[in-house]
Image: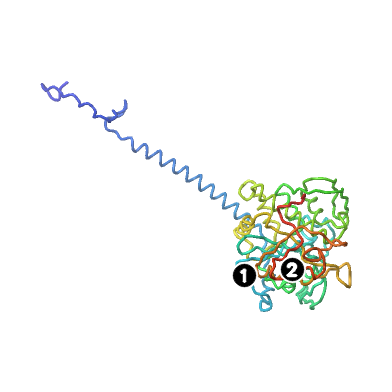
Amino acid sequence: MTDRAGTPAEPDPPPADGDTPPAEGTAPGAPEEPRRRHWLRWTALGVSFVVLAAAGVGWWFYRKLDGNITTDTTAAAELRKYEKERPAAVVSAARNILLIGSDTRAGEGNRQYGRDKGTQHSDTTILLHLSAGKSSATAVSLPRDLMVTIPSCPKGDGTRTGEQFAQFNWAFEFGGTACTIRTVEKLTGIRVDHHMVIDFRGFKKMVDAVDGVEVCLKEPVDDHDAKLKLPAGRQTLRGEQALGFVRARKSIGNGSDTERMDRQQQFLGALVSKVQSDGVLLNPTKLYPVLDATTRAITTDAGLDSLRDLYDLARSMRAVPTEKVQFLTVPRRPYRFDANRDELVQPAASQLFTQLREDRPVVVTPGGKDDDGQDGGTDGKPDDADIPTPSVTPTFTGRNAAEGVCS
């Protein structure tokens, strides 16, 4: 072969060290880089699609959960009218949240507990104090039969009630959440920052979302009014049984409302402990059902009516050690003029309110009750001589979430 007639062609030079000879069928000098760029482009597009799809699903879940929450704007409007008489927040970083369990028969799943009379009482009311440093959470039960001064409140028909001395749960019937908040603030001197209201159906859904809560019964229970029939021993309660357990009065223990509040505190402590120990807050497959049930179950003020707000609250609670999640009932005893009603034990109750208001430590330890099952003060007695001095951290009868309901 020649380059031109009569001139022999020179052979191609050998490849330099490190060069790769072109593959068979590939024109010498044809680049591989365009193909590599083409493959990377399609990979990037695929990854982007997956990321966008996941983000879209996440956004859909977020909007769904966010939309589940019912906002109570009526209470905020009413409270603004009385801003000047409301107590000021002493420690701004601490938060006080009023938790109200409504016994309303209105709404899906609630009519089975009785006829809807168009009214509702606060079946359970708990003032939850979260310390500024997230080092403790203290839940104080306020007895439904506690005799208190209820301020003048607007009624549903447009009229107003007069200020009156009556049992505490009438405030919710008279004027709803705002009336209850004002009553609590007058009683305690503590500013209520937020509130949550939950009905029977919502409570059952929340318990089911964590797959039930374990309880222990010394004796079998058969309570027609509470729709509760249980054998003795250790067992896990869900839905209807869980609601009956926290509502029953006549068939468990001595039938007092004080004992029922203690049982509610035990159950809530076990619920908190289960959520924390089961890793619910860190497991999306477990967390979503809990969030869905919770957001559907509650009515809140505008400061807690978003998923972000509730997540921040849950994160604050998660930061609190289980043994520092404390439950107690405000020091009380039978009302001197009616044994079926309650009154505060002083100065123990005022000392508790001061500690919470100023975000000071409160120590809760197991203790006895008096002969009527009443919580009389720091050691279960109504004797003022047993009240500790202000220089000593006060100790009250109660329990913490680490104990659980079977402790």
- Mark 1: which amino acid? Val
Nearer to the camera, 61 or 203 = 203
Q: In this view, does 267 lie above or below 361?
A: above
User: Residue 70: x percent and y percent?
Assistant: 67, 61
x, y percent for residue 299: 69, 62
| Quadrant into which the N terminus falls | top left
Q: Which amino acid does the dot numbered 2 rest on?
A: Pro
Whether residue 349 sits left or right of residue 308 in the image: it is: right
**Residue at 87% of width from left, 48% of height from top?**
219
Q: Which SS class for mark 2? A: loop
Instruction: Say the numbered circle drawn on residue 91.
Output: 1
Residue at 59% x, 54% y: name it: 62
Element under disc 1 = loop
| Residue 74 visible to the viewer | no
Give the crowd class for mark 1: few <14, some 14-19, many >=20 residues within 10 Å.
some
Nearer to the camera, 11 or 9: 11
Q: Residue at x 87, y 58 (%)?
A: 255
**Dot 1 and dot 2 residues touching (CB under 8 Å):** no
Give the side of residue 85 with respect to residue 22, left or right.
right
Mark 1 vs mark 2: which is more N-terminal?
1
Location of residue 196 in the rendering, given as x and y in whole percent from the top left corner? 70, 63
Q: How is the image coloured?
A: rainbow
Quickly name the residue at label 2: 388
Q: Is residue 22 visible?
A: yes
Give the distance between the C-alpha atoms of the residues marked 1 and 2, in whole angstroms. Answer: 24 Å
User: Would you place residue 143 above or below residue 399 in this image?
Assistant: below
**Place of residue 333 in the rendered image (x, y in percent of width and height, measured from the top left):** 83, 67
Report the front residue among 308 and 248: 248
Q: Could you say which quadrant of the image residue 124 lies in? A: bottom right
